[in-house]
Image (cartoon, helix red, strand yellow):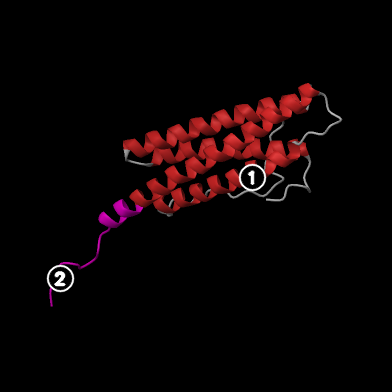
Amino acid sequence: MDLKQYSKKDIILSALKSEIDSEKTYLELAKRVKNIMLADRLKFLAQEEKNHAIFLRDLFKAEFPGEQAKVPESGVIPLPEIDIDNESIAMSDLLDQAKDNENVAASFYASMISIFSDSEQQSPETQQRLAKVRDSLLYLATMETGHARILETEAEHARQNEHDTMEWEMIHVGP
């Protein structure tokens, strides 16, 4: 993902918005499912996204001291969203959308690393801080990939469950 056309502030705020939206989405999906284990898994993912948002708020404060992180209504950087308002979409499809979001987030965080590069002109302390930021972003990218794997497994399970509970009209009617 090429982020060169965006400001560092817009990138961080877009990432923050995405994490806040993802937390809300996972909590909403957790309310909809009947499977308690899936609901717990979705709540776990919501907590993970909340933790990512905390990291991003702290990063914003470090990069822009004295400024308030105003989360935009819509992200400057177009990131995919999950269509949770459409209740006719099967849970497996919603989980697939969430998986795709997590994969995009992983790519996004991996791309963010490049905007926190250091140069010889910076102090050793600044270089060390930037190295920690890059390491944290790489870790976030890895976590998002892990979330995608969890969602892929859950989507497959939901798909099987949806198939097993499908009603086939007139299936038992003979010739």
Name the residue that disc number 1 marks. Answer: 108
Relative to 117, residue 108 above or below: below
Relative to 16, residue 74 above or below: below
From the viewer's side, name the closer residue of 13 and 148. 148
Quadrant location of the C terminus?
A: bottom left
Describe residue 20's horizontal placement relative to residue 32 as left or right: right
The image quarter containing residue 120 is top right
x, y percent for residue 41? 40, 36
x, y percent for residue 15? 65, 39
Please tell me whether residue 170 belongs to the stretch shown in magenta. yes
x, y percent for residue 18? 61, 40
Amino acid type indicated by mark 1:
Phe
Name the residue that disc number 2 marks. Answer: 173
Residue most extreme to the bottom: 175
Q: Main secondary structure of the magenta part?
A: loop
CB atoms of marks 1 and 2 within 8 Å? no
Residue at coordinates 76% horizontally, 36% vertically from top-left?
A: 117
Residue most extreme to the right: 121
Spatial CA distance of label 1 from label 2 is 53 Å
SS type, badge 1: helix
Please tell me whether residue 161 belongs to the stretch shown in magenta. yes
From the viewer's side, name the closer residue of 96 and 167. 96
Few, some or many C-alpha atoms within 10 Å of disc 1 (few <14, some 14-19, many ≥20)?
Answer: many
Amino acid type indicated by mark 2:
Val
Decide if residue 129 is in sight here: yes
x, y percent for residue 45? 47, 35
Residue at coordinates 27% horizontally, 58% vertically from top-left?
A: 166
Image depth: mark 1 or mark 2 in front:
1
Residue at coordinates 32% horizontally, 40% vertically from top-left?
A: 35
Few, some or many C-alpha atoms within 10 Å of disc 2 (few <14, some 14-19, many ≥20)?
Answer: few
> Going from the N terminus, do you reach mark 1 or mark 2 first?
1
Q: Which residues are magenta?
A: 159-175
